Image (spheres, rainbow, N blue to C red):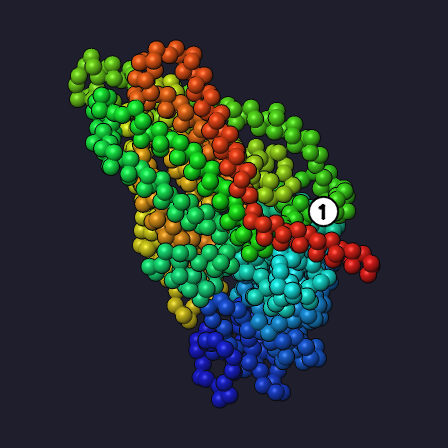
Amino acid sequence: MSKTKQASTPYTVSGKFLRIPAPKTLTPKYNTQKLGERTHTEAGTAVGRGDQILFINSLPGLTMSKAGGDEGEGAAGGSSISSTAKDQQPADKDVEGKLPGKQSTSAVGPGWTKVTCPCCVSEQVEPLVLVKLGAKVRPETKRWLIKLIGTPHSDGGAALLAHPGEDTAGDIIVVSAPRCTLLQGTEELGLCKLYSDGDMAAFSHNDKDNFKDSDNMEAFLTLAERQYIVKYGLENMRTQREVKVPGLPDSFLLKSRDNVWRKLGSAGVIADMTPLHSRAKLKALGKAWYSGSQLSQPLDSVNEYFGSPVGFYFSFLDFYTWSLLPPAILGLSLTFYSGEAQKEMESVSGSRVDEETQTVLSGHVIQAVFSMIWSTVVMELWKRRSATLSYRWGTLNLSERFAEPRPGFHGQLGLNPVTGRKEPLFPGWQRDLRMALVSVPVVGLFLGLVVLGMICFYWGEAHIKQLHKDWNSLVSQTLLYLPSVVHIVYTNMLATVYRTVAQSLTEYENHREESAFENHLTAKVLVFTFFNNFAVLFHIAFFKQDVPLLRKRLASLLIVSQVVNQVTEVVVPFLVDRYISTPLRAETEDDPQEDKFRNQCSLPAFPGLFAEYIELLVQFGYLSLFSCVYPLTAVLLLINNVTEIRTDAYKMCKLFRKPFAPPVADLGVWQTAFEVLSFVSVVSNCWLLLLSPQLQALYQDTSLSSVNIFLVAVIVEHILILVKVTLAFLIPDEPEWIWQKRARIEYKSMQALKQQTLQS
């Protein structure tokens, strides 16, 4: 459409606008307005005439007319929504002539579906989520889906606001949420919000007026929470009766209590769903996060924009990075000031170490004891920090088990004995049986394949070395690298296959809550990753008992893996984004809003935080398990993590789509994994101390038997475990004031329940 001459009376509204000529006639479709488009009408003019104004502001919200007034003149203060709505009604019916559900007559604005109550009417609608439809979705299917998204929960809808984008022939739907839906989602998720007395309290919809800013959703809920509630509503739509979807084959039916979003996804109607960026907020966050020279992170802003999972990860990364300072200082002191720098270099390079110059009380003993104590103190202090953040971010009292089951959950339809709602039910004993008889053996099989690959690697390496010794040629020298290359390819392929198998196993276990599904999936992959990363090191330490080789392998892993991670995680994505993706997504200020939304959807999906946590866990394992043989471990990790904070922040803001963020109260299963590693470190360090040349020489001088040496090691191990348990007991998991706040939240919830019962 071409630009026209500016009207004599400009249409005054904040933001930047582009005047485009209106069509002479309006085709009676579901909706004729584009996203952010408004019809400029003057008194006495017919709907559809005059200049149309395309709103192209950058995502703070789309300005809409306030609902009200006489419907015959337009429910949006003179806009064309009422006439269009009348024209569209026949097209919105399904093939059986039934609407998906009833809606109120109050319209939020042009193009958006109607709200269900007057208190949800607003002058602005904030685009929150972009739904991408399949390439072959027909307009009648899109109209039906938009209608269903706006339908109340009681009729099987999501009670959300939907906009068709350009028109019903397009492949996108923009979704937002009215106030009441956001408040109901806040209660269902069990989020805590600031009460009128200044304390955090579990939100109750019946008591919403006593919560601070409950009438202002942008202040009451974070952007990440609003977007997740939209996703939560879409994924939990369940049909109330058998429904035939317009535009799909007659064989496709939605049966009663079917999950609509899951079924439409399997049918190719729903292709993707993406939370939308706020350009202004993202720019401000990037400037305060990775662009400046500040050392501290804006964790509250990260939580507000990306959600509590991302906030907890970066908080832990920050806490763990600075906690590396004590072991780094100790490692530098032991290495350089005790005269062991040259010995460390010789050990890494494979040279012989003069044992006569070593003292009995080596720095290795100090490093081993310190690492075991350090790992315990760090995890206990992190628990306290985690509880503080959970209270501040309102996730201290999550109630996921009372919410709707996750989309992939299936079972026989029945009444939930806890909530009384009709939903799929699946006995817990069947899930346990599936885990015991299927999941555990399959995971064990893959762990056996890891061990088999390691054995084959050593076998092949030994034979190639013997072959090179016999031939001593250029060909045999080249073949020396063959076992390592084959082993790397084997482990990578096995890891890829295992991830798919672990996903299928967790789906087969049929967990009701999303967090339970993620925890079991993470635990499966975590066990495999632990074996994949540490099996070779444990084999060298416990079977070969070769400390110089262990030191050499550990130093190589630390240096090479960090360089490879930085290149693959930052440099390659940056180059791809800068020279390939960005030119394809080039946009100007005057581009339609729909095109800007599509550009966001064209970014690669965020791969999740799994790889980031794995990297930190492997680091933690290197430091707590084996740092006594290479004291510079903490120094290398500290240098890596200082840059890791900024590179991970850059990736979040620039290289990937914005992820959905379900509220979480802590690190979940990852915290358990770090604690397990800290206990394993006791066994590992005690064994490595037994292998140290100083103690070996001491045993020979005192003529101790191998049995006595083993008993001494077991006694020392139990003493150190007792020390760890004592430290964990002496350092409470939560500060006392957090414990009091938690108790007060529970007390307020009980009082609110009593009051609600009395009123009913």
Residue lying at 23% horizontally and 29% vertically, measured from the top left: 343
241 and 287: which one is in front? 287
* Label 1 environment density (alpha carbons within 10 Å; few <14, some 14–19, many ≥20): some
Q: Is residue 505 left or right of residue 602?
A: right
Please name whichever residue, 219 or 296, is drawn nearer the observer in this view of the structure.
296
Q: Quadrant of residue 38?
A: bottom right
Q: Is residue 39 above or below residue 303?
A: below
* Residue at position x 30%, y 24% in the image: 360
Pick the residue in front: 7 or 559. Answer: 559
Report which residue position mark 1 lands on.
Answer: 257
Q: Position of residue 62 (x, y in %)?
A: 54, 70
Amino acid at circle 1: Arg
Residue under the point 57% across and 28% down: 439
Q: Is residue 149 left or right of residue 275?
A: right
Q: Secondary structure at mark 1?
A: loop
Most distant residue in the bottom direction:
8
For the C terminus, the image quarter is bottom right
Instruction: Tell me if residue 295 comes above or below residue 698 in the rendering.
Output: below
Q: Examine the image and state in which quarter residue 693 appears.
A: top left
